[in-house]
Amino acid sequence: MVKIAIDAMGGDFGPEPIVKGCIEALRKKQFTPILIGKKSEILPLLPKRYRDKISIVACDDVISMSDAATDAVKRKESSIYKAVDLVKSGEADGVVSAGHSGATMTLATLRLGRLKGVSRPALVTLMPTKVGRRSVVLDVGANVDSKPEHLAEFAVMGGCYAEDVLGIEEPTIGLLANGEEKSKGNEVTKAAFKLLDGYRGFVGNVEGGDIFNGSCDVITCDGFIGNIMLKTSEGVASTISQLIKDYIRKSPIAITGALLMRKVFRLLKKEIDYAEVGGAPLIGIKGCAIVSHGKSNARAIENAIYQAIAYVDTGVNEHIVSRIKELKEKEA
């Protein structure tokens, strides 16, 4: 049975939504959860019938959002350090944390190490599309500056993730640029294009709109651009949702229409709500680490746990190692 280490203290709202999300996941999936954090705060949140199903690893230190990511390496008694170390020792198969994302990525990379052939791990996000399935975008924050070979590796890893975890047969892979033409892009993307040219599934340059229209399954970019894209998308979705609510409140006719459209609004909210995705996998490391939003509610934690289970069950890491080797042989 898959064992998931869950940082119970990292989120903005304390352990309550994290424990609740863990319990909800346990009701629907068979796995072994290990909660790491302050036992005095976690235990009262656990119904008695779940106390023999959920292990608690006690620790009092918590990496706060104001701490530097590098501090986490020294603080061996912190909840995220202990959670990652459970994966390193083999006592857990994956880790889920809604805490300091930089600390989680730093510890996962340094303590677990990179997969063979991977120069840098990347953070993956899943974006909604108009065709009903999500597109894979990476990197969205693990690397601010990337070289062409890094982008090429991200593309390969994203393709493996789309194929194994999302079940997309022969996923299409694109490089995010300012135009579809081969001549577009900056020096880094142009060089990455050459490395990927001829690789299975690679369709060349894609534009920002292709992230959401479903024309490409995997969109590759560096972490600086990817993170701006992610935060902008979240802001646009939030603004549009608020504008719709404001306009509806101002018009009795609109209120009537909204009541009739409740199901549609529920479906729309589900598509754009980050809680429905759960978190961003850090791909390219020896193990599994899911980085969740600091404001994660119970639903987000529940879905992050499902992500971790799927990641472990599919064996995507072994697939990445073989595909990266294939890419390197192509370049030689």
Image (spheres, rainbow, N blue to C red):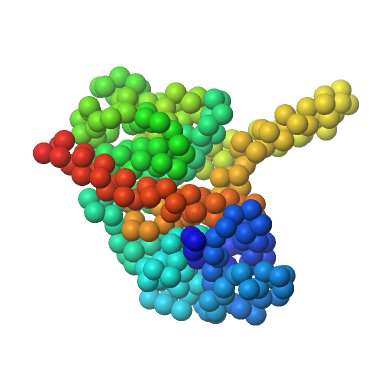
The reply, left or right, for residue 210 in relation to residue 118 is: right
> Could you tell me residue 249's position as x and y percent?
83, 33
Q: Is residue 39 above or below residue 308?
A: below
- Picture quarter with the C terminus: top left
**Nearer to me, 260 or 322:** 322
The percent position of residue 321, horizontal first and vertical second, equals 27, 48
Say how many tags the image has.
0
- Residue sitting at 72 percent across and 35 percent down? 266
Asked whether 43 or 17 is in front, the reply is: 43
Write down the quadrant of residue 111 in the picture. bottom left
Does 40 sit above or below residue 226? below
Q: Is residue 263 above or below residue 112?
A: above
Residue 141 seen from this side:
no
Looking at the picture, tell me which residue is in the foreground, 318 or 213. Answer: 318
Which is nearer the eye, 143 or 39? 39
Residue at the extreme left:
332
Q: Quadrant location of residue 151?
A: top left
Q: Residue at x 30, y 25 (%)?
A: 204
Residue at image coords 67%, 69%: 50
Q: Residue at the spot x=54%, y=25% of the render?
A: 131
Is residue 128 toward the left or the right of residue 71 in the image? right
Q: Position of residue 327 (x, y in %)?
A: 21, 39
51 to the left or right of 316: right
Tell me residue 129's x, y (percent): 53, 29
Q: Residue furthest right?
A: 252
